Amino acid sequence: MTATFFFHGKLYICRPYYLFVMERPPILKVQRLTKRFCKKTILRDISLDIIEGEIFGIVGSSGSGKTTLLKTIVGYLAPEQGDVKFRYDYYVKKKDKDGKPLYASVYRQQQMARSTFGFASQEPSIYPKLTVKENLKYFGSLYKLKKKALESNIDILLALMDLKGSQKTLAGELSGGMERRLDIACALIHDPEILILDEPTSDLDPLLRDHIWSLVQKINKKGTTIIMASHHLSEVENFCSRIAIIKDGRIVDVASPARLKTKYAESQQIKIQSYPGSYANIVKSLKKPGSKPFEFNIKGSELILYSDYTQEIMHELLHTLEVLKEELIDIKVSRPGLDELFLKLNARK
Ligand SMILES: Nc1ncnc2c1ncn2[C@@H]1O[C@H](COP(=O)(O)OP(=O)(O)OP(=O)(O)O)[C@@H](O)[C@H]1O
Ligand SMILES: [Mg+2]
């Protein structure tokens, strides 16, 4: 019996009496990326290693820089500083003199970088007046695939993405879920090493989302490394091997979903509603010198406090409410879920 698992960039193979540990070199190295639009800095010194075979999630709120990061990674946008390096030895079929992988910059080896990535952008790129099959043919022609290879890739993708029955349908007549599947199929037409998905399930209902996720896992099982952006931490936690949290163009944490949970497991949240609800004043009073550390988030009519020192914060909070003449309407103490954890990380100054 053999069990394999993947942890911190290493492939572990467990057989009775043996534990093999295989180091996997990164398939992609994002090195100190900084991107500006006019004078506004959008990405700040971002570094990431993506390991071959993983599903890597980039999670952040709207405007945090996810799409800019993905477009800079694939080379559509040029950074002001930093570099992105991909496995060049896959194309030249040789390694360096120590047998280590060779890497090249996506900005210098643009042609090879184009073959390395498949990119399904946030807005579908398909042509509504072409049929499903014609769209696939068109995108294949951009990569100058041989006719036989193109036909074979189209057949494989139509089956894989459950589009076989709709190959003659105009793309403009597809449902939202089918359109999304066709867009992903077009990004895969040249059989790239890395598939980049920018919010693949946005605007889809839960059933269609599940369908897309099961297809993403199928694509990954066939050997494609996947990098995806999403708003929802809880949605991607079941699929991603690791998740990077991005805030204001900076990576604030990178870890496996399980690690993210245990890392913050000590932390509890106190949710309160009070009247008149001057939450900024309450927070200001709680943050006096010498008080226990906490983070906070004001969400609708609630104030949420996150801390490893729940007892002490609770004590201070009740005292502060009394001093500020805030009437307590509701109070709850619980452990945060992944989405709440995300809000907590986002609430950090
Ligand atoms: N071409 C551009 N020119 C100027 N500013 C831009 C451009 N593209 C993006 N931005 C700005 O960069 C910031 C990050 O945008 P980006 O689209 O990367 O965020 P996002 O995390 O993908 O957001 P969403 O979740 O809404 O898709 C935003 O402030 C946006 O206005
Ligand atoms: Mg975006």
Image (spheres, grey):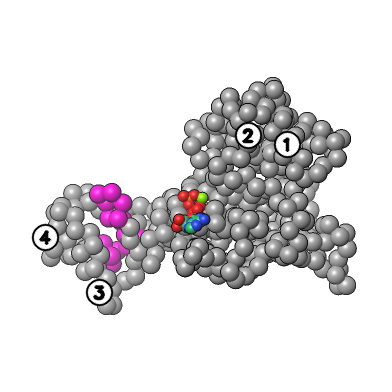
Dot 2 or dot 3, earlier in sequence:
2
Which residue in the structure is indicated by mark 1?
138
Provide the residue span drawn in magenta. Answer: 298-315
Q: Residues at badges 3 and 4 in contact (C-beta under 8 Å)?
A: no
- Disc marking residue 288: 3
* Residue drawn at x 59%, y 35% as measured from the top left: 180
Q: Residues at badges 1 and 3 in contact (C-beta under 8 Å)?
A: no
Judged by depth in the image, the label closer to the viewer, 2 or 3, is 2
Q: Amino acid at mark 3?
A: Lys
Q: Amino acid at mark 1?
A: Tyr
Q: Residue 326: give x, y in percent of width and height.
A: 14, 57
Q: Residues at badges 1 and 2 in contact (C-beta under 8 Å)?
A: yes
Judged by depth in the image, the label closer to the viewer, 1 or 3, is 1
Which residue in the structure is indicated by mark 2?
127
Q: Residue 134: give x, y in percent of width and height.
A: 72, 30
* Residue drawn at x 70%, y 45% as measured from the top left: 220
Cα separation between marks 1 and 3: 63 Å
Dot 4 or dot 2, earlier in sequence:
2
> With 276 as the anchor, is 30 left or right in this view?
right
Dot 3 or dot 4, earlier in sequence:
3
Cα separation between marks 3 and 4: 18 Å
Judged by depth in the image, the label closer to the viewer, 4 or 1, is 1
